[in-house]
Image (cartoon, grey):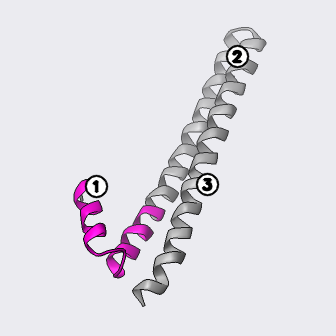
Amino acid sequence: MDRTIQRHGQLDAEGEGLDLIRQLANSAQKLASRRTILQRQIAKAKEIAKELGSYHHARAQDELQSVIIDFADKVNDRMRQLDQTLRDLLHFVSPIAN
């Protein structure tokens, strides 16, 4: 569903109804799926960095690994924030829908 249409529907419902809870739960599932994809990509990037390190200077491998880890940490932190926001919203709207 287009995000603009989805947002208008949420505003029209004034935050009530089970549809909002379903949408938030769906968003949480998508976030979990993307976290799994990210972890696979990070593992692959580390593997590639290790392979490149065997062809180049070890310092270059260390620097590349550091960049990968820093990137992964930043993305994981943001995903944790989004996950917490979704949990907070679900907790907040659940009593309203009942």
Tag in front: 2 or 3: 3
Residue visible at 22% across and 59% down? 5
In the picture, the quarter occupied by the C terminus is bottom left
Q: Nearer the viewer, residue 50 or 31?
A: 31
Q: Position of residue 33 (x, y in %)?
A: 48, 56
> Is there CB contact under 8 Å for labels 3 and 1?
no
Q: Position of residue 97 (x, y in %)?
A: 40, 85
Q: How crowded is the residue under tag 1: few (<14 C-alpha within 10 Å), some, or many (20+)?
A: few
Q: CA distance from mark 1 to mark 2?
A: 43 Å
Q: Main secondary structure of the magenta part?
A: helix
Tag in front: 1 or 2: 1
What is the three-letter code of the residue carrying label 1? Arg
Residue visible at 65% across and 21% down? 51
Horizontal arrangement in the rendering, residue 78 relative to residue 19 (left or right): right
What is the three-letter code of the residue carrying label 2? Gly
Q: Nearer the viewer, residue 57 or 4?
A: 4
Q: Is residue 94 above or below residue 41?
A: below
What is the three-letter code of the residue carrying label 3? Arg
Quarter-of-image position of residue 11: bottom left
In this figure, which residue is indicated by the disc labeled 2?
53
Q: CA distance from mark 2 to mark 3?
A: 31 Å
Tell me which segment is drawn in magenta: 4-28
The circle drawn on residue 80 is: 3
Whether residue 6 appears in magenta in the rendering, the answer is yes
Q: How crowded is the residue under tag 2: few (<14 C-alpha within 10 Å), some, or many (20+)?
A: some
Q: How crowded is the residue under tag 3: few (<14 C-alpha within 10 Å), some, or many (20+)?
A: some
Q: Earlier in the sequence, mark 1 or mark 2?
A: 1
The circle drawn on residue 3 is: 1
